[in-house]
Image: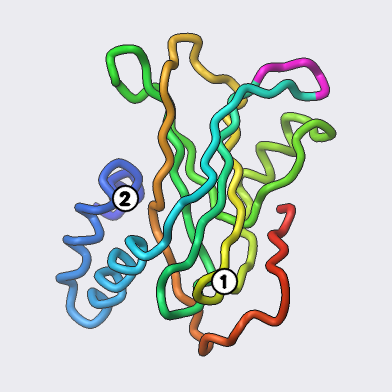
Amino acid sequence: GFAALPLTIRVAPERTSALLAHVPIVGKTFAHDRNLASKVELANVQGRFQRLRNARRVFVISGDARNNSGMTIERIEVAGALYGLGGGELDQKIVTTGNRTTLTDLSEAEIALLQRLDPVIALAPGETTPFLIVFLEPPREFREFSSRVLSVRPTRRASTPPAGPNRGSVG
């Protein structure tokens, strides 16, 4: 029943969105969300190992999400994945954009908390917002990584032109 829905959304988001789009009354919301996700571009994506203040070695995927749609967006989820030598997925993390910060002064608990936060953003058309995905325990056998836009939620407010430089939140 309903308990399987969150797992299904995580494992097969595109297929779930397509199925939910057929639900009467609310289905159009899911179809719109899927189409909007294709209008957000990930840029400047980098993957690198980094040391925390306790000398722990973590793997970080960072970049920027650019709103190429014609509407203001309030939430973008980005999925990052690590793959092994044979191409199989070893680990995946999902974060909300707007969470980039420097890791050197943070503890593992603080990083884990930042990864779960859902920053409030108002990303106008053409603007970018940063993202940061941290794998605290990257598998030793990992060889490749990827990132992709998982979901997008438009604001309920009208789009307004940017007032100044976009400053991403730290949380």
User: Which callout, 2 or 1, points at the residue further toward the start of the chain?
Assistant: 2
Residue 165 lies, in percent from the top left, at: 71, 70
The amino acid type found where label 1 is placed reads Leu
Q: Is residue 154 above or below residue 55?
A: below
Residue 111 lies, in percent from the top left, at: 70, 37
Predominant SS along the magenta part: loop
Residue 6 lies, in percent from the top left, at: 35, 50
The label on residue 146 is none
Residue under the image location 49 percent in, 60 percent down: 76
Q: Residues within 10 Å of mark 1 (few under 14, many from 20)?
A: many
* Quadrant assignment, res 25: bottom left
Residue 79 lies, in percent from the top left, at: 44, 43
Residue position for label 1? 123
Residue under the image location 59 percent in, 49 percent down: 131
Tell me the magenta residue range: 53-57
Q: Does the magenta run of residues contain 116?
A: no
Q: Is residue 8 above or below residue 86?
A: below
The amino acid type found where label 2 is placed reads Ile
Marks 2 and 1 close (CB-CB < 8 Å): no
Residues 89 and 1: in front is 89
Q: Does the magenta run of residues contain 56?
A: yes
* Quadrant assignment, res 34: bottom left
For the residues marked 2 and 1, what is the alpha-carbon distance in whole angstroms?
Answer: 24 Å
Residue under the image location 48 percent in, 67 percent down: 67
SS at badge 1: loop
Residue position for label 2? 9
